[in-house]
Amino acid sequence: MDKEEHIRYWLISARHDLEVAEALFETGKYDWCLFVGHLVLEKLLKAIFVKVRGNKLPPRTHNLVRLAELCDLSLTEEQIVLLDKISDFNLETRYPDYRFDFYSKCTHEFASNYFRKIKELYKWLSYLLK
């Protein structure tokens, strides 16, 4: 794949996952909505990485803060804290030791707040890819 094909792959995959996250939110699967929301942002950051670094493959990491750093993004302290928190959704959903605690935290209000922020980041990161 060339650079543009890589970027297109990540964008299409992120858009698809955002639709999945929306469906999960609507059905009350808030923990999985936030997990997939994390994937959405990860994929957009990987698209930005390819755009910035050429045809180089993005690193195999789920750490959103690290990916943003590798993309040379200028982030506010608030954005760094938010990306770090959203990165936790990846771990808290996947690993059983943490899952029930995270599941208990994922009320409608909690998920609504973070999902709104994920969608705002989605719009901003998508804009950076234009």
Image: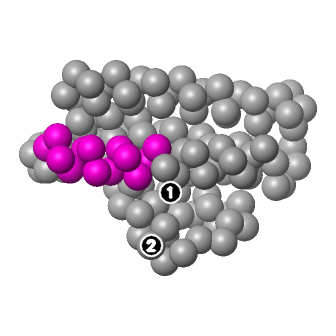
Point 28% across, 51% down: residue: 113
Q: Secondary structure of the magenta portion, mostly?
A: helix
Give the quadrant of the N terminus. top right
Decide if residue 50 is on the left or right side of residue 121. Answer: right
Point 65% across, 44% down: residue: 126
Residue 59 shown in magenta = no
Mark 2 neighbour density, 10 Å: few (under 14) some (14–19) many (20 or more): few
From this view, report whether residue 63 is shown above or below residue 4: below
Query: What label does residue 78 carry, if any?
Result: 2
Region of the chain picked out in magenta, as a range: 107-119
Q: Residue 59, image x and y in percent? A: 66, 50
Are the residues at dot 2 and dot 1 in contact (C-beta closer than 8 Å)? no
Mark 1 neighbour density, 10 Å: few (under 14) some (14–19) many (20 or more): some
Residue 112 shown in magenta = yes
Residue at the extreme bottom: 77
Point 62% across, 61% down: residue: 68
Give the quadrant of the C terminus. top right
Q: Is residue 90 visible?
A: no
Residue for badge 1: 63
Q: Residue 6, image x and y in percent? A: 78, 33
Spatial separation of the CA atoms under disc 2 and disc 1: 16 Å
Query: What label does residue 45 carry, if any?
Result: none
Instruction: Report helix, strand or loop for mark 1.
Output: loop
Instruction: Report helix, strand or loop for mark 2.
Output: helix
Tag 2: residue type? Glu
Observer-side mark, 2 or 1, equals 2
Decide if residue 103 is on the left or right side of residue 76. Answer: left
Q: Residue 31, image x and y in percent? A: 24, 38
Point 52% across, 51% down: residue: 121
